[in-house]
Every structure is written in C-alpha cells, then in structure tokens.
Image (spheres, rainbow, N blue to C red):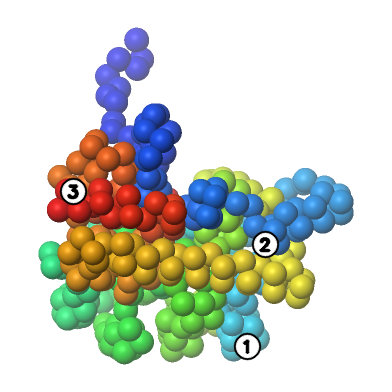
Amino acid sequence: MHFNDIQRVPGDPILGLIDAYAADPNPNKFDLGVGVYKDALGLTPILRSVKLAEQRLLDTQTTKTYIGGHGEPRFGALISELVLGKDSPLLESKRVGATQTPGGTGALRLCADFIADCLPGRGIWLSDPTWPIHETIFAKAGLMVSHYPYVGSDNRLNVEGMLATLNQVPRGDVVLLHACCHNPTGFDLSHDDWRQVLDIVRSRDLLPLIDFAYQGFGDSLEQDAWAVRLFAEALPELLITSSCSKNFGLYRERTGALLVCASTADKLLDVRSQLSSIARNLWSNPPDHGAAIVAEILGDPELKSLWADEVEEMRGRIAQLRAGLVEALTPLGLGERFAHIGVQRGMFSYTGLNDDQVARLRHEHSVYLVSAGRANIAGIDASRLDLLAQAIAAVC
Ligand code: LMR
C-alpha cells in the first residue's frame, strides 16, 4: 500500500477549534478561538457594502475568464491606495505594485517563495510570539526562521529586547513586522517604537515585510496604516501583505495582495516578473470574486463610505467588548490583572492565561481559546460577559 507510512498530524491549532466548538452541546459555550468578527447576534455578517457590490457584479459582470498572474489592475491600484494613502508618492512614481493573492496567507506564501527564490541565503525574523502560520509558511519555503522578543513572560511588550535583537540581525535579512493589531498578542508598538525599529532596519540594511491583516480594527483605517506609510516613505524597498478577510468580512473569498515597493519603476517590473512566475506555479491565477467586490467598493465613493462606517462599527464593538470584559472581571477582583485587555488592539488578546487554564476553560466551561491564552475578543457575546468573567475567575 502506498499510504502505509503516512502518519496522522495534529489538527491546526486555530482552525481545529471550529470543529471542537461546533461539536460542544453546551448552550452556554463561548467561541473565542479563530479570528472572525461576530455581531451582537453572534453572527459573522456579510457587510451591507459587500452585498451591494456583489449585486452589482451579478448584474454587470460579463466574464469569468482568467485575470492574469497579478490579478485585476483596478483592484491592485485601489488596494495600494488604501494601504499607502492616495497621495503616496510611490503611486505617482510607479514604485509600488500589487499582486492579487488568495487571502493574506496567499500573499505571505508568495512572499516566502519570492525570498527563497530571489534572495537566497536571507533568513527571516519573526516576533516571539507570532501567528503560528508565519512560523510554518517560511520554514516550508526553506527559509531559516529566527525570532526577536516581542512579549515577555510578564505578558508585556518587550520593546527593549526587540530592539536589542534586531540590532544583531545579519545585514540583509528579512524582518516580519505586524502593522497593527498584533496577532496573537494585541500589543502594538508606539509611534516612537516604530521610529526606532525603522532606524535599525535602515542602519542594518534589513528588508521589512509588514503583515497588514487588520487595517481598520485597531484605531482607524488611516491610523492603522501609519507605520506602513512611515516605512514606505523612508525606505527604497518594502514588502507588504494585505488582507481583506477581516475588514471586508471576506474570509472565505480569499482576498488579499502582496504589495512590493521597489527603488525604481523599472526594478519593480523585474520583481513583478518573478512574482507572476512564482504565482503561476502556486495557483496560476488568483481567485477573483472577493477582489472584484473590494474593487467595486473602493472604487465607488458611496459604497466606500458605507464600508468605512461598517469597519468603524466593528472596531467600536470590539473596543466596547474589551472594556466590558475588564469591567465584568473587576468585581471578581481581577480587573487589574486583566487591565491589559483594554489596552491591546484588534481582535486578539494575549490574556495571560496559561495552557492549563485554557484547557480548564474549554473542558469545564466550554470557553474556547487558542493555546498560550489567545482570546478572540471579537467573538465574545456581550450579553454573557458576566458568565465569561465567572468562568475565567474559576480557573485563575
Ligand atoms: C486567526 O489568527 O485566527 C486568523 O488569522 C485566522 C487564521 O487563518 O488563523
């Protein structure tokens, strides 16, 4: 038999929770696992702007033919504007190009193969901790993966440790940075921290790869792009992975882009020729439905404004849930211990709960968190905050 020696591997640490949660018969269960937004009804809604754009596509789209390796140019131009700002000098000088990808994960995968093929010998540096798929995607592409400290055992941002390690990174290596809403911790760098990182990147000639998966979920669509724009204006070369999964709610449509900023328009064409060749061997042509929706929204002032309001609504709800959880923990004597939940940004919180407490929450209270204590705050049911706080108190 050909498959006899194949061993079963453990399920994905994040996506595996979807099935475990669904199978739990407890009516009071909490799904704080995979990073999806849920509204007050516990649903992950299709945004109104998305529905309207989809309807337009249904009425007007005339073909489903291939769109080419880089995807739809209109999507690429609009997503570049969203990320870099419409007045970015890079747009005018044609130093930035977007490649449409199957989600932000596809953009990371394309980036990993690009580094392996075109920048041989470069290692990649990830924050410790980081999204688990960062670890595997670059390792599977054959890159040497190393880490810089980010959050210490005290569950606080360790900027000093981060800067000290980045100062030792071999010249030319790639450093992956989270633009905002750090996954899994929710701890973001201050503007001053970012400036210090930029100084090191410049002085050690590192190549930054900024993962931008949560634009609009931190402080606002514009403010969340602050560090990306700082780097894009200060450096000749930059890689950015952008995801439309969360801010457009297009999770299963697999919509994202890899943006490359190059030193000249001509050099960009060289890089893009490599990217389309790599993409051809990965997925040939990118999926288009989600990207067509995004282009429809961003290209229409009315739809764009409706969408921006919807992003703001999601962001505001997450902020309220953060404050609400700290408030519900306070009478249980845990307000101070979990005060960081109110300071963190985006969907996720590194709660500080250890693996044993996470296991007890799951088995004794049907509260599902990712290991190392990552909670998806955007998945909390606001009407049951007290129940959640009591479950947390019971394992602390
Ligand atoms: C998460 O971290 O939960 C999300 O980014 C979903 C995923 O693909 O892991």
Estimate the spatial distance between the alpha carbons at disc 3 and disc 1, rounded to whole Å.
52 Å
The residue lying at 49 percent from left, 65 percent from top is 317
Q: Which of these two is toward me, 80 or 305?
A: 305
Mark 2 against mark 3, which lies toward the viewer?
3
Estimate the spatial distance between the alpha carbons at disc 2 and disc 1, rounded to whole Å.
20 Å
Image coordinates for residue 135, horizontal then vertical, percent: 30, 53
- In the picture, measured across the screen, residue 173 lies left or right of residue 299, that is left
Q: Are marks 2 and 1 in contact (CB under 8 Å)?
A: no
Task: Indicate the quadrant where residue 353 lies.
Answer: bottom left
Task: Indicate the quadrant where residue 25 lies.
Answer: top left
Image coordinates for residue 279, horizontal then vertical, percent: 55, 52
Q: Which of these two is toward me, 41 or 166?
A: 41
Q: Which of these two is toward me, 367 or 116?
A: 367
Q: Report the amino acid beneath label 2.
A: Val
- The residue that mark 1 highlights is 87
Q: Report the amino acid beneath label 1.
A: Asp
Q: Quadrant of the N terminus?
A: top left
Image coordinates for residue 50, horizontal then vertical, percent: 69, 57
- The residue that mark 3 highlights is 394
Numbered disc 1: secondary structure: loop
| Between discs 3 and 1, the one toward the N terminus | 1
Residue 127 showing in the rendered view: no
Q: Are marks 2 and 3 in contact (CB under 8 Å)?
A: no
| Between discs 2 and 3, the one toward the N terminus | 2
Numbered disc 3: secondary structure: helix
- For label 1, the crowd category at 10 Å Cα-Cα, with few meaning under 14, some 14 to 19 and many 20 or more, is few
Estimate the spatial distance between the alpha carbons at disc 2 and disc 3, rounded to whole Å.
44 Å
Residue 294 badge: 2
Q: Which of these two is toward me, 92 or 293?
A: 293
Q: Report the amino acid beneath label 3.
A: Ala
- In the picture, measured across the screen, residue 132 lies left or right of residue 96, that is left
- Which residue is situated farthest in the front direction here? 331
